Image (cartoon, grey):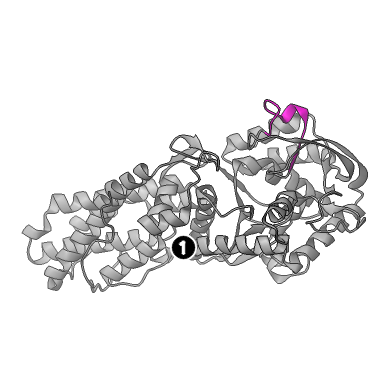
């Protein structure tokens, strides 16, 4: 047993969540559930980023106060995470009083360190991404992240000495080669750090929907410094028990567009404040839709709530992880989702459970079999539990799920090879019992990915869901409840 602290980014509340947000939060949820199965003390943090110019303008366009605007959108996130079965421990909002107080203390500490100075910012600013950009970062004169127009900004500002920490961060990368995963994302950050690193503008005077900058109340804290601080404010930094127990974060789960903020700016801020750095930053790719980038103008933004309600939450969770290995971009289409449901969930997992439970109900008195003898021994060898545990502990979710699917296929082959319906007596008992044991082990390992399905499988075979300690083939009493398919074909 140990501790495990996993975070998502706090999501910007200019609109309701889309499929990309769902991908991030499902990854984090799988990791949280996995570590709970291991018996670890888990703190899973998610939440919303509610300050900044974009929110201020959106509220003005609606004719409402910014707080009213964000309150309405936050409820859409909470409802979406409920539908997606997200088991977070805390949902933080940057408008929470405790968070705003912690940001003030964090700024004060960095200021007292001498790492903040007054100056003037002149350059490009992307309102949608709340990001300051240099000429060299622009792509065809537009924001490199969202592709939208940028505006020229010139105003008094306070700067954080990011350049001071350039060499320290590069040294940290060399000493911690697995800090950013996948590794090519670390190479991207290191290459960028090798070039010119300018100090970071951390205040605005023209945006008042923000946290006041303590050393000079005529300024307001830049939204990204505000946002990143949530990872410690949520734990009650500086004196909270949760902070003392759970920090540093074991992994920040993020999308590739915010890697610089989490892998360079955040470590620099923490170094300045004298705090430990997170253990890992996990950077996933983007979801396109039918081969095109999601865009309101194209009308192809996918609502994960609608998809989950139409096809089931677990089917969507499964599809998101099966779509790409960590770090790779992927594509969402309902056609591909339906193909996964019918071709893998129904044909492989669903049929395995349905056939096995039906046979057990028919031949219930024969279930008293044994393992590690004849039929059982060959089945036990079909799953490498230690390998799956290693994959999960190293955040290789796609590969771990692939191993589980291989095991399901081996269980289906076991049925085809043994033809239990032709057996009688001890042979039949051993065969059915070994199938039930294989399914029980599978139900535990699939739980982080598809929690409702896992519990339903356990219910059908008549056992309680186990933990990692129960991932061994052993003698137990089974009382299969009922048959029926846990997944249905869809068109």
Residue 166 sits above or below residue 473 on the image: above
Part of the protein shown in magenta: 131-143
Q: Pick the quarter of the image with the N terminus.
A: bottom right
Compared across the picture, whether 19 is left or right of 231 comes to left
Question: Who is closer to the viewer here, 447 or 137?
Answer: 137
Compared across the picture, whether 397 is left or right of 1 comes to left
Looking at this rendering, what residue extends furthest in the front direction?
Answer: 63
Residue 149: x, y in percent? 69, 34
Residue 472 visible, this angle: no
Question: Who is closer to the viewer here, 43 or 129?
Answer: 129
The residue identified by callout 1 is: 83
Residue 64 sits above or below residue 284 on the image: below
Q: Residue at x 73, y 48 (%)?
A: 266
Residue 142 visible, this angle: yes
Q: Residue at x 40, y 42 (%)?
A: 333
- Secondary structure beneath dot 1 equals helix
User: Which quadrant of the figure has residue 179?
Assistant: top right
User: Which quadrant of the figure has residue 96?
Assistant: bottom right
Q: Does the magenta run of residues contain 100?
A: no
Residue 295: x, y in percent? 55, 40
Question: Who is closer to the viewer here, 394 or 375?
Answer: 394
Compared across the picture, whether 85 is left or right of 483 comes to right
Residue 93: x, y in percent? 68, 63
Q: Does the magenta run of residues contain 142?
A: yes
Compared across the picture, whether 395 is left or right of 269 comes to left
Q: Residue at x 18, y 63 (%)?
A: 432
Q: Residues within 10 Å of mark 1 (few under 14, many from 20)?
A: some
């Amino acid at each position: 047993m140990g501790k495990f602290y996993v975070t998502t980014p706090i999501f910007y509340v200019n609109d309701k969540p889309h499929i990309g947000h769902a991908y991030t939060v499902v990854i984090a949820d799988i990791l949280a559930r996995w570590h709970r199965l291991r018996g670890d003390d888990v703190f899973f943090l998610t939440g919303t980023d509610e300050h900044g110019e974009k929110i201020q303008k959106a509220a003005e366009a609606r004719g409402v106060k910014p707080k009213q605007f964000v309150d309405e959108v936050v409820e859409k996130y909470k409802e979406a995470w409920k539908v997606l079965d997200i088991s977070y421990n805390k949902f933080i909002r940057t408008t929470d009083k405790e968070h705003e107080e912690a940001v003030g203390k964090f700024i004060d500490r960095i200021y007292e360190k001498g790492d903040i100075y007054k100056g003037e910012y002149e350059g490009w600013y992307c309102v949608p991404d709340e990001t300051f950009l240099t000429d060299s970062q622009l792509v065809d004169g537009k924001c490199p992240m969202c592709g939208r127009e940028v505006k020229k900004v010139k105003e008094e500002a306070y700067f954080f000495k990011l350049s001071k920490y350039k060499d320290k961060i590069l040294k940290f990368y060399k000493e911690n080669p697995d800090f950013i995963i996948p590794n090519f994302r670390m190479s991207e950050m290191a290459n960028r750090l090798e070039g010119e690193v300018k100090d970071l503008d951390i205040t605005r005077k023209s945006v008042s929907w923000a946290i006041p900058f303590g050393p000079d109340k005529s300024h307001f804290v830049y939204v990204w410094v505000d946002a990143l601080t949530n990872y410690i404010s949520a734990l009650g930094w500086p004196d909270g028990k949760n902070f003392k127990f759970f920090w540093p974060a074991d992994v920040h789960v993020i999308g590739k567009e915010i890697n610089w903020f989490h892998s360079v700016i955040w470590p620099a801020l923490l170094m300045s404040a004298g705090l430990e750095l997170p253990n890992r930053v996990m950077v996933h790719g983007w979801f396109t839709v039918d081969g095109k980038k999601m865009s309101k103008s194209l009308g192809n933004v996918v609502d994960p709530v609608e998809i989950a309600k139409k096809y089931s939450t677990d089917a969507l969770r499964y599809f998101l992880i099966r779509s790409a290995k960590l770090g790779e971009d992927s594509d969402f289409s309902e056609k591909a989702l339906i193909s996964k449901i019918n071709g893998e969930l129904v044909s492989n997992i669903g049929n395995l459970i349905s056939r096995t439970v039906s046979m057990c109900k028919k031949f219930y008195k024969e279930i008293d079999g044994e393992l590690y003898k004849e039929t059982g021994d060959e089945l036990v060898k079909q799953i490498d539990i230690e390998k799956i545990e290693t994959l999960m502990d190293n955040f290789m979710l796609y590969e771990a799920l692939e191993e589980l699917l291989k095991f399901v296929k081996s269980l289906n082959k076991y049925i085809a090879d043994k033809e239990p319906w032709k057996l009688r007596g001890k042979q039949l008992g051993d065969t059915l019992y070994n199938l039930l044991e294989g399914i029980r082990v599978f139900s535990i390992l699939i739980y982080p990915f598809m929690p409702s399905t896992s519990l339903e499988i356990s219910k059908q075979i008549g056992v309680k869901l186990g933990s990692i300690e129960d991932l061994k083939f052993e003698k137990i009493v089974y009382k299969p409840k009922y048959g029926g398919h846990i997944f249905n074909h869809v068109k």
